[in-house]
Image (cartoon, rainbow, N blue to C red):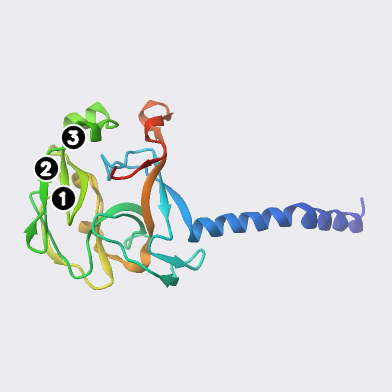
Amino acid sequence: MNAATLRSRAHYWWRKEIRWWLVIGLVVFSIRSSLADWSDVPTGSMKPTILEGDRVFVNKLAYDLKVPFTTCHIAQWSNPQRGDIVVFFSPRDGQRLVKRVVGLPGDTIELRNNGLVLNGKPVEYQPIAEELLRDVAAPDRASSIFAVEQLAGHRHAVAAIPSVAALRNYGPYLVPEGHYFMMGDNRDNSFDSRYFGPVERKRIVGQATAVAMSFDRGHYWFPRWERFLTALDR
């Protein structure tokens, strides 16, 4: 086979096959970059709201529209609110994380013996309903304390692990303008803004709104069918 024939075949495959797959791939990844995406959750830092092995749906249009593959805003129509679960790039190492917004720009955040204090007022905590712990493994139930946190009208479950060393007292800290204070719902097992500081607005990717799929890593990745397509903070 001579060089001319090879070039001809290469041109044919580029024109008939490869080019279109590249176009399709570019469109798909552009949509994931700017409109909607999913995020795997490998740790228990958001337990009991999000479990290890959950894959959460991320609405990237919740707050703004970005240039694909960048953090540059084309348009912005909203901002994260207290209680939102968001996906963002860590200011420490750029890793993509899933946490809850507990502090807005201008808020003063304090933690007293694991109790959140917002702008000088202690946040309310209430007993948790058993149904909210339905999917939490028995060992985690035994080692943790669970409650419902009332954060500026937003109710969600939180957890603490008394047996581990953790940062249970923090602040007071004034959240700077253009930044948000993030914390995991599993307060004693979360690497969050208490350690790496507040998150700049442009680093926020979007809002996590639902569990798309869930697989139990402790049981051979068996599907947790009851968690498929369920809203977060339900």
Picture quadrant where residue 147 is located: top left
**Which secondary structure lies at badge 2?**
strand
Residue 77 image point, x, y percent: 38, 69
Give me the residue at 14% from left, 51% from top.
167
Q: How many marks?
A: 3
Q: Along the horizontal axis of the image, is 37 left or right of 148?
A: right
Disc 3: which residue: 129
**Which secondary structure lies at badge 1?**
strand
The kind of residue on which mark 3 rests is: Ala
Picture quadrant where residue 87 is located: bottom left
Q: Which mark is residue 126?
A: 2
Residue 158 image point, x, y percent: 20, 44
What whole-number distance in Å separates the C-alpha atoms at marks 3 and 1?
Answer: 14 Å
Nearest to N terminus: mark 1 or mark 2 = 2
Disc 1: which residue: 150
**Which secondary structure lies at badge 3?**
loop
Q: Along the horizontal axis of the image, is 130 left or right of 27?
A: left
Give me the residue at 10% from left, 50% from top.
124
Circle 1/circle 2 CB separation < 8 Å: yes
